[in-house]
Amino acid sequence: MNNQRHLKTYKTIRNVLLLCAWILIGYGWWSGQQLWLYAGTALVNIYALIMMAKDKRWAKQGKLRIPESGLLLVAALGGAAGTWAGMIFFRHKTKHLSFTIPVPIFFIIQMYLLFIAIR
């Protein structure tokens, strides 16, 4: 039961944080104020990096893991840089094709979209 509560808490925090980040990103894009755009992007990427670190630590301790789909969701919704940094810094998920192929692609797409948004 404790593991189920742990997973539910993770999903709730993830969803609230993604919503807040996307509100900041959307407001920054709509208003033309780049600070909000950068703040939302930074928020989701820092969160992605922290989740990669936690998942690696929990894997070493044999605890309940964060589902790969959740990590990839965060990467796809703006956290590709943080996820990729977590893969490199913590040597986590680097042998999984489900991460080594899409995360760099997500990163390229997100950097392109950010470049377009700041022009």
Image (cartoon, rainbow, N blue to C red):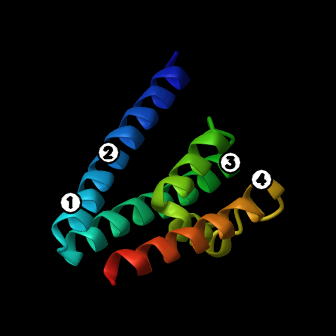
Residue that mark 4 sits on: 98
Q: Nearer the viewer, mark 2 or mark 3?
A: 2
Q: Residue at x 40, y 31 (%)?
A: 9
Q: Of the residues under marks 2 and 4, which one precedes in the sequence?
A: 2
Q: Residue at x 25, y 52 (%)?
A: 23
Marks 1,2: beta carbons within 8 A? no
Circle 2: residue type: Leu
Circle 4: residue type: Ser
Query: Residue 102 appears at what percent x and percent y?
Result: 71, 60
What SS does tag 2 mark? helix
Residue at the far bottom in the pictured view: 119
Q: Tell me the quarter of the picture where residue 39 sits.
A: bottom left
Q: Is residue 107 above or below residue 64?
A: below
Residue at the far top in the pictured view: 1
Residue that mark 3 sits on: 59
Residue that mark 1 sits on: 27
